[in-house]
């Protein structure tokens, strides 16, 4: 299992429910669906740094009431969403 630091996100402007298409870091980028699969299978773990606190936080898979899966950081009391606060990937 490898750990990857997410340093950027790619917004999904066409899908208001999804909000992001993927995450990236130093030398890597992957789609949200693959990242969800990696986390659920225990293949890889992902984390980021909360911009307002500088603290490391794990990225987790959550499920909406309609069954759709999405990513968010572990509860850290920081608003807004740590993932959406990351800069956009090039």
Image (spheres, rainbow, N blue to C red):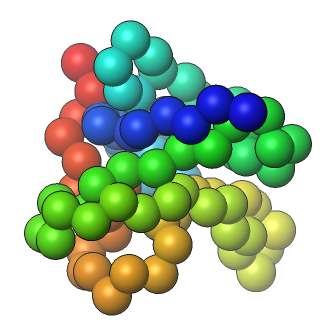
Q: x%, y% of residue 41?
A: 86, 42
Residue 84 visible in the current orientation: no
At a point 58% along the width and 29% down the height, the residue shown is 31
Front-lying residue, 59 or 56: 56
Q: x%, y% of residue 62?
A: 68, 68
At a point 25% along the width and 74% down the height, the residue shown is 80
At a point 73% along the width and 46% down the height, the residue shown is 39
Determine the residue located farthest toward the bottom in the rendered image. 77
- Which quadrant of the structure image shows residue 13? top left
Residue 50 visible in the current orientation: yes
Report the side of 12 relative to 55 (left or right).
Answer: right
Determine the residue located farthest toward the top in the rendered image. 27
Above or below, comparing residue 18 to residue 82 in the picture = above
Q: x%, y% of residue 44?
A: 69, 36
At a point 74% along the width and 61% down the height, the residue shown is 68
Above or below, comparing residue 4 to residue 53 in the picture = above
- Which quadrant of the structure image shows residue 78? bottom left
Above or below, comparing residue 72 to residue 48 in the picture = below
């Amino acid at each position: 299992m490898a750990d990857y630091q997410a340093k950027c996100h790619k917004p999904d402007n066409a899908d208001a429910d999804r909000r992001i298409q993927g995450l990236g870091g130093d030398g890597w980028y992957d789609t949200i669906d693959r990242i969800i699969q990696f986390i659920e299978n225990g293949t890889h773990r992902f984390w980021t740094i909360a911009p307002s606190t500088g603290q490391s936080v794990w990225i987790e898979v959550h499920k909406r009431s309609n069954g759709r899966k999405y990513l968010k950081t572990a509860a850290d009391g920081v608003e807004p969403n740590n993932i959406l606060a990351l800069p956009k990937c090039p």
